[in-house]
Image (cartoon, grey):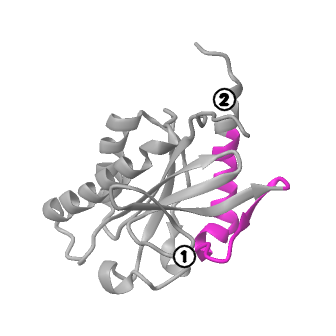
Amino acid sequence: MGSIRLPKPVLLFMAVFSPDASAFDWVRKLAETRWGTLALESETFAFETFTDYYTAAMGATLPKRLWAFENLIMPEALPKIKCLTNDWESEFKAVTACTAERPLNIDPGYIDLGKLILASTKDHAHRIYLSEGIFAETTLMYTQKQWKPLPWTYPDYQSAGYQFFLTQCRDHLKSKRTSPLK
């Protein structure tokens, strides 16, 4: 019989996209108040080059940024984080002048040394229910010193730019786990 062990803290990851440029600072301020400063921020990606799935609700031009936070979280915090970011999406819609049906999308997840997990409100065969109406999926696996997609991995997460950033995140997590406490 295996012994039960608690998981190690993980790196909070967030993908944010919006047709409204002000959304990024708005979300960042809220998120940094909650989880500490950003440890890493990606370049801005043109999300519309990967899919047109959100065009009807969000518009044809969708800048997207990926963030990782300095403060680590426990994996079981993910459902509450996803519920909170959903609330933020609703709040932003109420305060923005942007006329898009959905002016903001925030996708939280976490990075562990062997995987990238994303939270979702949608069930599917490859997703596991966590709590509070939130499901989780392993979006990428880290094996043989590289990120490997799964059959359901979104095209943007398979791109070199995303994977470069995710490797930086993984390296940051690894250094945080091995550095002595201050």
Per the image, label 2 sits on a secondary structure element best described as helix
Q: Position of residue 164 (x, y in %)?
A: 69, 56
Q: Nearer the viewer, mark 2 or mark 1?
A: 1
**Mark 2 to mark 1: distance in Å?**
33 Å
**Left or right: 139 in relation to 30:** right
Residue extending farthest top:
182
Q: Nearer the viewer, residue 69 or 85?
A: 85
**Left or right: 136 in relation to 93:** right
Residue type (three-letter) at the residue carrying disc 1 = Ala
Q: Earlier in the sequence, mark 2 or mark 1?
A: 1
Residue that badge 2 annotates: 177
Residue that badge 1 annotates: 125
**Magenta-drawn stretch contains 136:** no
Name the quarter where the N terminus is drawn.
Answer: top right
Q: Which mark is residue 169?
A: none
Residue type (three-letter) at the residue carrying disc 2 = Arg
Bounds of the magenta segment: 144-171
Q: Position of residue 74 (x, y in %)?
A: 50, 37
